Amino acid sequence: MKIQALTGIHDRKSFDCGVEVLNFWLRQTALQHQAKGISRTFVAMASDAEEIESYHSAGYVDIGETSIFGYFAFTSAFVLSTDLAPELARRYPRQIPVTRLGRLAVHSNRQG
């Protein structure tokens, strides 16, 4: 399996994790947010033709070169030190930069 940044070549329409909100976000919003710099989405997919063939042999005939097994999206954010416990807050600047895991989903046929 390989992980790569989401592009327009990935098969977003066939992705179904069983949660419509996550499916819709991948299909309609992920690339728009990426283009605007709001978030960055990465997809898991088969690494090569040999791996795809092994899935076909196991009965997963729907898997192709652009099939998405799962995805995750990161976004930048910050935490205010005033939201921390007082003993921690004094050790940090007022705004602490963080990376937030915004979305995470696995195709329903690959869960478990």
Image: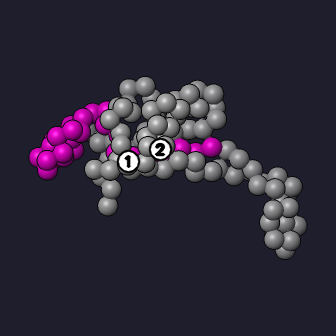
Q: Where is residue 53 in the image (x, y as percent from the top left)?
A: 16, 41
Which of these two is toward me, 54 or 72?
A: 72
State the separation of the CA atoms marked 1 and 2: 7 Å
Image quarter where the C terminus lies is bottom left
Mark 1 neighbour density, 10 Å: few (under 14) some (14–19) many (20 or more): many
Quarter assignment of residue 47: top left
Write the residue at 63% across / 51% down.
100
Write the residue at 45% across / 29% down.
7
Q: Name the residue under label 1.
A: 17
* Residue 22 circle label: 2
Quarter assignment of residue 75: top right
Chain part drawn in magenta: 49-75
| Residue 23 horizontal side relative to residue 100, left or right | left
Which of these two is toward me, 20 or 37?
A: 20
Give yes or no for residue 76 being in the magenta stretch: no
* Residue 47 circle label: none
Please tell me whether residue 59 is drawn above or below residue 30 in the rendered image: below
Amino acid on which the number 1 mark rests in the picture? Cys
Q: Earlier in the sequence, mark 1 or mark 2?
A: 1
| Residue 39 horizontal side relative to residue 83, left or right | left
Q: Where is residue 64 in the image (x, y as percent from the top left)?
A: 24, 35
Tag 1 near tag 2, CB within 8 Å: yes
Give yes or no for residue 57 being in the magenta stretch: yes
Is any part of residue 75 visible from this angle?
yes
| Residue 2 horizontal side relative to residue 37, left or right | left
Q: Position of residue 73 (x, y in %)?
A: 53, 44
